[in-house]
Amino acid sequence: MAAQQGDVDELFDVKNAYYIGSYQQCINEAQKVKRKYAVVLDDIKTNSPPELQAVRMFAEYLSSQNKRDAIVADLDKKMAKSVDAANTTFLLMAGSIYYHEMNTDAALRTLHQGESLECMAMTIQVLLSLDRVDLARKELKKMQEQDEDATLTQLATAWVNIAVGGEKLQDAYYIFQEMSDKYSSTLLLLNGQAACYMAQNKWEEAEGVLQEALDKDSSHPETLINLIVLTQHMGKAPEVTSRYLSQLKDAHRAHPFLKDYLAKENEFDRLVMQYAPTATA
Amino acid sequence: MLTKFETKSARVKGLSFHPKRPWVLASLHNGVIQLWDYRMCTLIDKFDEHDGPVRGIDFHKQQPLFVSGGDDYKIKVWNYKLRRCLFTLLGHLDYIRTTFFHHEYPWILSASDDQTIRIWNWQSRTCVCVLTGHNHYVMCAQFHPSEDLVVSASLDQTVRVWDISGLRKKNLSPGAVETEVRGISGVDLFGASDAVVKHVLEGHDRGVNWAAFHPSMPLIVSGADDRQVKIWRMNESKAWELDTCRGHYNNVSCAVFHPRQELILSNSEDKSIRVWDMSKRTGVQTFRRDHDRFWVLGAHPNLNLFAAGHDSGMIVFKLERERPAYAVHGNMLYYVKDRFLRQLDFNSSKDTAVMQLRSGSKFPVFSMSYNPAENAVLLCTRATNLENSTYDLYSIPKESDSQNPDAPEGKRSSGLTAVWVARNRFAVLDRMHSLLIKNLKNEIVKKVQVPSCEEIFYAGTGSLLLRDADGVTLFDVQQKRSLATVKIAKVKYVVWSADTSHVALLAKHAIMICNRKLESLCNIHENIRVKSGAWDESGVFIYTTSNHIKYALTSGDHGIIRTLDLPIYVTRVRGNSVYCLDRECRPRVLTIDPTEYRFKLALVNRKYDEVLHMVRNAKLVGQSIIAYLQKKGYPEVALHFVKDEKTRFSLALECGNIEVALEAAKALDERSCWERLGEAALLQGHHQVVEMCYQRTKNFDKLTFLYLITGNLAKLRKMMKIAEIRKDMSGHYQAALYLGDVTERVRILKNCGQKSLAYLTAATHGLDEEETVKNHSYVFLKVHSDINAIAAKGKAGQMAADLDMDAPGGEGWGDDAELQLDEDGFMDAQEGLGDEGVGREEGGGWEVEEDLDLPPELDLPAGAGGGAEDGFFVPPTKGMSPTQMWCNNSQLPVDHILAGSFETAMRLLHDQVGVVNFGPYKSLFMQTLSRGRTCYLGLPSLPCLRSHPQRNWKDCGAKQGLPAVGLRLSDLISRLQQCYQLTTSGRFEEAVERFRVILLSVPLLVVDNKQEIAEAQQLITICREYIVGLTMETERKKLPKDTLDQQKRLCEMAAYFTHCNLQPVHMVLVLRTALNLFFKLRNFKTAAGFARRLLELGPKPDVAQQTRKILAACEKTLTDAHQLNYDPHNPFDLCAASFVPLYRGRPVEKCPLSGACYSPPYKGQICRVTQVTEIGKDVIGLRVSPLQFR
């Protein structure tokens, strides 16, 4: 993609739609492009199977909980050998799996080999999850040098801005806002805006944005999590908060938020044991 | 110079603007005077009575009059309302060059080739003064705008200034009588002249064609055949030449001062108009015509408008654009006025100057683009020579003193137009007409090749509208490609709706409304110039022309809302307010009546309830509305307007409303109505109505057939009877046939003498009567089955047609199916290829590995430091998360909980308030934890990222963060109300639980000041008092009351309860309980005490009355029957475990959090009130504010 800079990127709309989380539109666009550029695709396909395989691997990983260990082991083996650094898709998929596995070292090592915007964006995400804002900023600078106006660079800028906080939060908000103006508002963008608002303690404004997200999808996990935060900060009745929590528990048992939540509950129970009154009645 | 209007005519020798209306008079060389409306561009009237050229022309300032003077020696005074010449003034002996009204007196001043200047009184229609002295043609004579002076120009090369104060005194002083001019001298008996020459200005060395006073300064400008324009200054005693403007290369025809600026305009036979700067005496602008010599100039007295007459017509023009540069964002209007950028808040109408613009350009700001994200503006300035245009990029200062705003340093570059395309990017159309994208530092980020383009407009983030000669293109800047194009010539302005779903493209005389994809929705043509526009909140486009505010719906419907005196520039429309800027850049608000367009909009959107509401309340009714509705296809709405039955009827039919039509038809009761209704009803299958119609019109045949097809045999039989009575043989027979009634048919045939036919019929259906009766049913069936058959055939026909319709559809599907197959095959092929590809690629992969031996080793994380010199990647260690910092930065328990550090949080709670049993805290902990982090999505299908809202986000930097708490003291306080309500309604256990949650929440607060700390502590006290009291009361209710001792204990507890600090409303209840119990126990003295306390609280009247009675009863015997462990006069604390009084001075243990008291044996146990803390524990104390650590 980087090589095509300057030319019109036929897959532009598809990628954009994908990055901002507008998946239905992404599929529509992709079909449009596919019909027109079937020949081009044909060309790509003859030498692209490793990429497709990588995607399949990731899909398998996501879909079946019990095969995960095997897939990761398989991946480890592949990674132990040399990898084709030009196969961005493979790198991305491998990085995604490692990231899901919370093996950030491996994820970063994998992504480090790629030079595409996608790899850098994912690197930034991993670094942010490690609270290495400093390194994320460096990586972002590299992205900006490559193509500052690319959708992915803009999004990555927004993530880093959120992590940096302070005045940068407003910038992050504008990036999300601009994208939803430009394309369409999606759950991803709305939750991004909500995060910016909440980080600025603008709870009323966040409520509007999250309500819009909730209207789009009433069981979207991140929206629900943000609502759990929001309703408490707005001083709503505890029942409102617990309703969102149970909704989340019902629909997204495996969500990392809930995993953390349960772990914390256990931790609490364990810690309670350490205290006792000196006398009993 | 901007030409506003042009005419073609014979040579124009004189011009005059109307001071108020948009009119200009042009007097022509062929004797005609034309009255033009320069705004509507129409000729209003023609006055053709002069014989030969008309040179002098002037409107009266107040009256509907004008004066003209011609080569026929005549001065004519006209009334344009009456459209005729009122009278003619005779006296001049040669051509008349100019004629002017006095601004105040009823005088006319005329200059003539007879070398005289005359003053006439147009009321008495006489010449009141003759000014002699020039010794050649007098080309021009004008009154001074305020003083008693006249200036004249003559071919004798002089300009003269005359003092006419004598004339004024003589003629206009009270009681003065105007005298007829004696001779031509104007010298009275005493030799004093009415008008005397005051100054003679010599300097031109050829004949002078024009001279004029400055409107306010003691200056005169003159133009002469020596090709020069001269400026003269005068005072009481003398006048002198100030300066000369050289540049014209032929005779100067006319020269005037600009009424409001330091400018002089002159025109000449050299076919040019020139504009001179008065102070610098240099030419600033020149406007040339190819073939026409200029003869005269006129300046509008109030507006920035001029007119110039030439050989083949005249032009009306202005020197510069008067459109203010403005931009609207949300509730803010930004506009440029007098070198300041101002900001107007629409809501508060607060208008402030936010910054001063850099000076340096002589041209006003042409357009503005505002960037709300960066609070920055781009101001574009157009030069006369477009290539010299520039733009400035300013970032607006955050804090500004409106009286003396900052003048920040802007960044200036050349370029025609600059427009924001993103938060940190703007597009510049440079003078080569190529497109540059720049960043906030005004550095070029990239160059974009665009199709030919002469202007760019904003089109939302990342897009631009490019205008070329005959269309507008929507261009995506990022992808560098055109997305859509629409044809419309010369768009001048672009107005986007607030949600950018619609755009209005404004050209000089046309408006096109398009959607986001630039698909044209409607086109509106205007005869007058379109000026500006804005979208109202309901999606109606409100725009202005030179003289109207109008509306346009996206459906193309448009109309006038109101008229305007002067052009305005709409900035925003809300409700019935139109916010605008006028030409003086003053923000104004006009009110409009939006009913009409709201009504039409509601119609378009099919919101009929709204329509009806408006119809009923706005009194819109009128023929035009009905016609409009009918024309636009809303007969059903029009129906509601109409009272006239006939119109109602036809409207109802039009919209197929049979019920209403029936009503109307009943009221009208006309044959034609019933027939039409019948037809319409038949089409709708409304056969009851059809039946009624046929009945009313007595259409028996059709009625009979109707009954047949509806199968209503009883009625059919009735019809047969009717036919019989009417002696309608054929109808009778037909009905019988329909009914299958053979006997009847036979009878009819017999009756009408067709015996053979009767016989035949009888024979066909069985000979004798019985048989006919039998067969009757068969025939009936047969007829019916025939009918069915016909019906079936009809249906079959329809179905066939349906099938035909389907056939091509089938083919279509076939095509698709084929396509599908192709694709499938293609897919297969691809898959096949794919497999091969895999093999090959893998081979390649292996090769790669063979080539590079090292990587596997390098990849081993254990290979410590191995090849560290080049690009060996070391995964970074985990950074410090905001939550860790929270723990570092704070000693408040809630901050640690929010950070997820339960362990430290518990320790803090333990040390500060002595919590030892954390069980009840679990839900609070988990809740608090769950509001500590928000999430946002990064890349698709990856786990979300986390953000941590902080309460000091503005200034915490990277290290000093503290979490946003989300639990407010005020929330807790408001939750108290619920608890009080529960208490009032007697649900004590629930109330206790809630009080306890509040109590436990208090240590999880963060407050800012000492007062709030005190309030938090007070909150704890309130909760404690209630919990202790309510728990005791619950306990008391469980106790037995059989023995006296038990009853005594109950009384004691009730008495203690009155010493809990409760709300008055609760205390009343508590005291009543205690009062009753003690009264029953005959402890009257204590009871009386309770009664008095109760009365002090001001209970309800009935309670008070009862209490007083009891009190009275107690006071009779003021003694206590039993000794109780209760002394109301000895202060005590209540043990929260054993519920016994701990009188002051006795040892007591307290709960470290709630402060509840206990008798010493309870030390070390769990506090009964909080259920989490250890009684008597040594602690630091409640910490809810960073203040407490200083």
Image: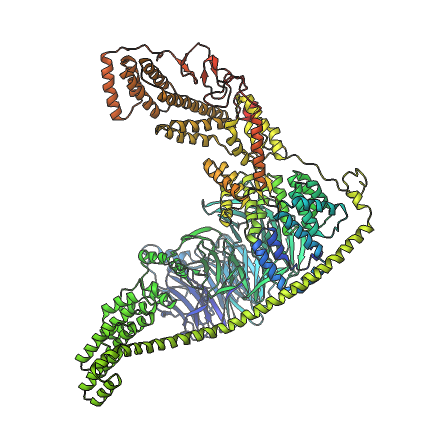
Which is nearer the eye, B1044 or B780? Answer: B780
Please name whichever residue, B93 or B604, is drawn nearer the observer in this view of the structure: B604
Q: Residue furthest bottom?
A: B756
Q: How many dots with numbers?
A: 0
Q: Is residue B1040 left or right of residue B717?
A: right
Residue sitting at 63 percent across and 48 percent down? A154
Viewport quadrant of the N terminus of chain B: bottom right
**Quadrant in which the C terminus of chain B appears:** top right
**Relative to residue B54, is residue B250 drawn left or right?**
right
Residue A83 percent location from the top left of the image: 75, 49
User: Percent x, y for residue A86?
Assistant: 74, 52
Nearest the viewer among A259 and B282 is A259
Quarter of the image where one finds residue B947: top right
Q: Residue at x 47, y 63 (%)?
A: B141
The way the protein has been coloured in the rendering is rainbow
The answer to whether residue B214 is above or below residue B925 is: below
Q: From what the image shows, is residue B1040 above or below residue B19?
A: above
Q: Is residue B836 visible?
A: yes
The percent position of residue B286, horizontal first and vertical second, equals: 59, 63
Q: Quadrant of residue B398?
A: top right
Q: Answer yes or no: is residue B279 visible.
A: no
* Residue B68 percent location from the top left of the image: 42, 68
